[in-house]
Image (cartoon, rainbow, N blue to C red):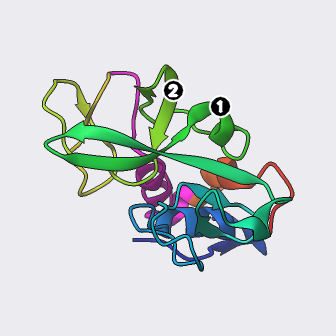
Amino acid sequence: MVHHDLYQDNVVIVPRWLTALLKGRFDEHCEEQGHNRKHKNLFCLECRACICKDCDDHANHRLLKIFTHGTGRNQSCAVVKLDNTNELLDCSHIQPRVHNGAQVLFIKQRPQTSYGGNNCERDGCDATLEHHNSFCSIDCKVNHIMSVPSNYRNAKWLLNRVNLP
């Protein structure tokens, strides 16, 4: 898996905040003093850290809200709202889902579903998708594009559209 900063012509193609988001563990409890019962449900884009709502050090930072989306069989996956994420990178061709009335995207490769359709284009991912989508998650899209050096020229969508570290 490609989860490190990748440079092409001295430009970061996979920004550090995206690398950290893809590595993030949102299923854990916050380890900050007094927060041990709170789930990490925010991602600080500036600090590149998974945090809970009570972490005060990030009050003036840009935060991305993380939701837990049930996928059946007692499994849940971290998702982000499509509207918020599309401000940061091009989310086209990633299969959206509906969570509490909002369109969301899986951050990491999602569990296999049983309905028909085409398969995720990432090697090793067997998720089925609706016919007009190519990827089941942000992670699958990033890894698919970065898996072939000739795809780098098509990776401009990964460049952060906002000024983030």
Residue positioned 23% across, 57% down in the render: 124
Q: Crowding at label 2, few (<14), some or many (≥20) Cα neighbours within 10 Å?
A: some
Q: Nearer the viewer, residue 57 or 124?
A: 57
Label 1 secondary element: helix
Q: Is residue 101 left or right of residue 81?
A: left
* Numbered tag placed on residue 83 in the rendering: 1
In the rendered view of the protein, which quadrant contains the N terminus? bottom left
Image coordinates of residue 35 in percent, x first then y, are: 55, 70
Image coordinates of residue 136 in percent, x first then y, are: 36, 41
Residue 4 placement: quadrant: bottom right
Marks 2/1: CA–CA distance: 8 Å
Q: Is residue 65 left or right of residue 75?
A: right
Magenta residues span: 131-151
Q: Are marks 2 and 1 in contact (CB under 8 Å)?
A: yes
Label 2 secondary element: strand
In the rendered view of the protein, which quadrant contains the C terminus? bottom right
Which residue is denoted by mark 2 in the rendering? 103
Residue positioned 59% across, 80% down in the render: 33
Residue positioned 72% across, 69% down in the render: 12
Residue type for callout 2: Gln
Image coordinates of residue 151 in percent, x first then y, are: 54, 56
